[in-house]
């Protein structure tokens, strides 16, 4: 076995590989770009080497820099993770030439499967079933069109070199074929530098079922059963599970044998995945991914095996740790991919700093593979996947309940994520029934992506309680200063200590305003007059774990409210709600340093710049409007001043802490 390896990747998969290496007593070397100097994968490694500037082509895709780092640190092997260089045959070859072991299949096996067309031709010879279609070398448009007609519409055009769902076009009729072909070719050429395509029968309600295979240098090959990855959006996986719902022993054996035959046909070694598309009783080979897959943890959960350990053993020349009869399935596992993206805006990737990142406690039932910590930033440079939640239980229904619970206990503030969307998927009756096809998300889009989460009284009341508690926190501080023991608890009736008996809280959420009128009711807590006309009795206390125990008219529950200045994020019933408190006593938080520089309080987009250089402004005047976390934030002048420079204009994206404009403060003049 190796005693030192380099991990040529970042994020969750780099951390995941390091965890196994550490358990096996193998030292680890991380590589990082300038954007990742303080990243989790760097902190987790025994040592780390800088490989270049932030863009991936100049760092994580720079094979030469990575090989140089491995040689300089004395690593014996390179684990490529997934993505980046993991399926780059030249890189695998260059590692070998440099005397490093590439933890993956031989370069020839990567090449054999790198083209979907050639892979299909190979599989045809190995008698693995294929989707009806054309995967020949002749790329004449007329020929492709006539092949499409032979197959029968609808057909799917796929980039031979494709991956990640790119370069695919569904074509419904012969008339649409020429234009679709042209656009698929363009996308293929720009994404993969190769415009060749294949044409397949487009199955209208298929399931994606893939088989994990493993082979060693001694000629042994096994499969570790299947994963069902049918929950997809734009042909990309969102939720994965193992085993596949409804799978029979007979079919499992058949698919497993076909997958092992596929691996053996190309002299495979290491971990690989054979992807099949299944409809009715039929299944067809789609492609083989010659690397560890994002969703490998569900297989680990049901088999009790560590696939990264298997990879390292095989790469160091050992035989497979287990043979086929030793392997069996226990229970059921799900994985969800937590992305920094905004489902309400067509899943646009999101960036920003993770002000609050809270995940449920891990156990034998819950695994978290994460690449970030609270306080870290998600940047524009890399894939927006930030973590994976994996659950396991004895049967599918119990595992699904755990998945829902785990998602409800996942709280992210500062970066928009797909957590609520995943919770909606995990809670959908059609998904609970099992065996959905790849059209599931599109079919139920209205259920899964509600136009806007209804803002019910409970959410408003929770934000109100959190705001009152902040006031009470000041009262606590006063008590502490006077010598009383400070308690982490607060009682809402203490709110009156501030001298108020009535207060109106004006919240902004989802582009609307909501007024909550609070009244201190002597001896019986607080009465809140809600916007809908109802009156609720509120009580609450913070627990030591930071959660809020709220009593709303006798209904008691535990919730999480995270406050950042005047923004409250309320996590309630699997969804999160952002409310902005309009507080005249406490204007929007804006960083103003002594030199009169105004910085962005959070990452976002400049919507409007209302002033020009040289303009005189008054205290409180709105200077810039920033859109962040789905809301508009006004940046106002802290005092009377003259604008000396403006650094951004409308439409620009700004990072948290970026200097927006600088002011010459009137005060400075008098002080001088
Ligand atoms: P990629 O390299 O992007 O992963 P795949 O060939 O694996 O490309 O296809 C990605 C997804 O597209 C599949 O998981 C499946 O949902 C869908 N897909 C692929 N081929 C077909 C087909 N012939 N009919 C219907 N859907 C398909
Ligand atoms: P799978 O078939 O294993 O699900 P995908 O093609 O969906 O594979 O996922 C691989 C993709 O993951 C890459 O194409 C890339 O976009 C993304 N990726 C690559 N490296 C990382 C990383 N370190 N962290 C998160 N995502 C990554
Ligand atoms: Mg695929």
Image (tube, helix red, strand yellow):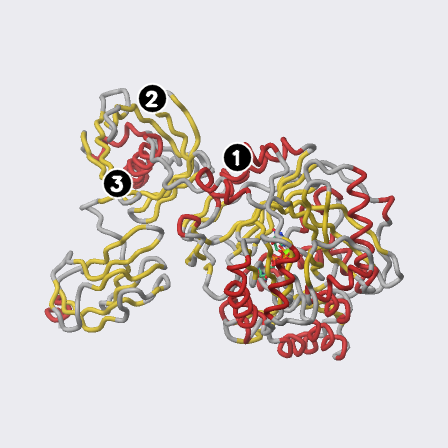
Instruction: Classify 343 as above or below 270.
Output: above
Instruction: Classify 295 as above or below 559.
Output: below
Q: Residue 59 shows which numbered tag? A: none
As measured in the structure, the alpha-carbon distance from the residue carrying label 2 to the one carrying label 1 is 27 Å
Q: Residues within 10 Å of mark 2 (few under 14, many from 20)?
A: few
x%, y% of residue 245? Answer: 68, 37
Which sits earlier in the primary sequence, circle 1 or circle 3?
1
| Depth order, front residue of 505/144 | 144
Instruction: Classify 436 as above or below 276.
Output: above
| Whether residue 479 is visible | no
| Depth order, front residue of 156/81 | 156
Q: Is residue 356 left or right of residue 167?
A: left
Which sits earlier in the primary sequence, circle 2 or circle 1?
1
Q: Residue 553 shows which numbered tag? A: 2
Of marks 3 and 2, the one in the foreground: 3
Residue at the (79%, 48%) spot, across then down:
256
Q: Residue 507 shows which numbered tag? A: 3
Q: Is residue 376 left or right of residue 124?
A: left
**Residue, disc 1:** 427
| Whether residue 125 is visible | yes
As measured in the structure, the alpha-carbon distance from the residue carrying label 3 to the one carrying label 2 is 21 Å
């Amino acid at each position: 076995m190796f005693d030192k390896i380099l991990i040529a990747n970042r994020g969750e998969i780099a951390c995941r590989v390091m965890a196994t290496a550490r358990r096996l007593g193998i030292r680890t070397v991380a590589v990082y770009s300038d954007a990742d100097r303080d990243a989790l994968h760097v902190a987790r490694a025994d040592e780390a080497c800088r490989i270049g500037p932030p863009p991936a082509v100049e760092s994580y895709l720079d094979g030469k820099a990575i090989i140089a780092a491995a040689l300089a640190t004395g690593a014996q092997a390179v684990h490529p993770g997934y993505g980046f260089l993991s399926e780059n045959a030249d890189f695998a070859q260059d590692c070998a030439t440099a005397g490093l072991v590439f933890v993956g299949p031989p370069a020839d096996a990567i090449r054999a499967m790198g083209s979907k067309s050639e892979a299909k031709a190979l599989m045809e010879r190995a008698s693995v079933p294929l989707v009806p279609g054309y995967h020949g070398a002749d790329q004449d448009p007329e020929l492709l069109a006539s092949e499409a007609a032979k197959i029968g519409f609808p057909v799917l055009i796929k980039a031979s070199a494709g991956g990640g769902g790119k370069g695919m076009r569904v074509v419904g009729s012969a008339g649409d074929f020429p234009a679709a072909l042209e656009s698929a070719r363009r996308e293929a050429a720009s994404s993969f530098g190769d415009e060749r395509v294949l044409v397949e029968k487009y199955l209208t309600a298929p399931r994606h079922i893939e088989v994990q295979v493993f082979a060693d240098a001694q000629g042994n090959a096994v499969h570790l059963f299947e994963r069902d990855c049918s929950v997809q959006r734009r042909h990309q996986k969102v939720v994965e599970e193992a085993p596949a719902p409804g799978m029979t022993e007979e079919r499992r054996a058949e698919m497993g044998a076909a997958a092992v035959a596929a691996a053996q046909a190309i002299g495979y070694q290491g971990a690989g995945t054979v992807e099949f598309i299944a409809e009715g009783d039929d299944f067809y080979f789609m492609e083989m991914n010659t690397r560890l897959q994002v969703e490998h943890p569900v297989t680990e959960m049901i088999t009790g095996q560590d696939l990264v350990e298997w990879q390292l053993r095989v790469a160091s020349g050992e035989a497979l740790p287990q043979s086929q009869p030793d392997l069996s399935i226990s229970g059921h596992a799900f994985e969800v991919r937590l992305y920094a993206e905004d489902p309400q805006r067509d899943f646009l990737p999101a960036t920003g700093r993770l002000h609050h990142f809270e995940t449920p406690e891990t156990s034998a039932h819950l695994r978290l593979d994460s690449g970030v910590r609270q306080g870290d930033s998600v940047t524009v440079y890399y894939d927006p996947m930030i973590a994976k939640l994996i659950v396991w239980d004895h049967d599918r229904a119990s595992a699904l309940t755990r998945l829902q619970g785990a998602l409800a206990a996942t709280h992210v503030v500062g970066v928009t994520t797909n957590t609520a969307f995943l919770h909606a998927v995990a809670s959908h009756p059609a998904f609970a029934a099992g065996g959905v096809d790849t059209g599931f998300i599109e079919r139920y889009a209205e259920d899964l992506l509600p136009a806007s989460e209804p803002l019910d009284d409970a959410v408003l009341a929770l934000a109100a309680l959190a705001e009152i508690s902040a006031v009470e926190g000041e009262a606590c501080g006063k008590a502490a200063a006077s010598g009383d023991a400070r308690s982490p608890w607060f009682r809402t009736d203490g709110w009156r200590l501030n001298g108020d008996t009535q207060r109106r809280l004006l919240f902004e959420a989802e582009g609307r305003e909501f007024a909550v009128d609070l009244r201190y009711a002597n001896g019986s807590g607080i009465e809140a007059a809600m916007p809908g006309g109802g009156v609720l009795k509120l009580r609450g206390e913070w627990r030591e774990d930071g959660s809020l125990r709220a009593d709303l008219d006798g209904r008691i529950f535990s919730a999480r409210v995270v406050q950042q200045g005047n923004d409250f994020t309320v996590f309630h019933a699997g969804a999160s709600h952002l409310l902005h408190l309009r507080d005249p006593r406490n204007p929007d938080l804006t960083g103003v340093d002594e030199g009169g520089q105004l910085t962005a309080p959070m990452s976002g987009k400049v919507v409007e710049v209302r002033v020009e250089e040289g303009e005189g402004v008054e205290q409180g005047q709105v200077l810039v409007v920033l859109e962040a976390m789905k809301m508009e934030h006004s940046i106002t002048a802290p005092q009377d001043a003259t604008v000396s420079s403006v650094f951004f204009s409308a439409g620009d994206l700004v990072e948290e802490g970026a200097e927006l404009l600088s002011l010459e403060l009137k005060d400075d003049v008098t002080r001088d």
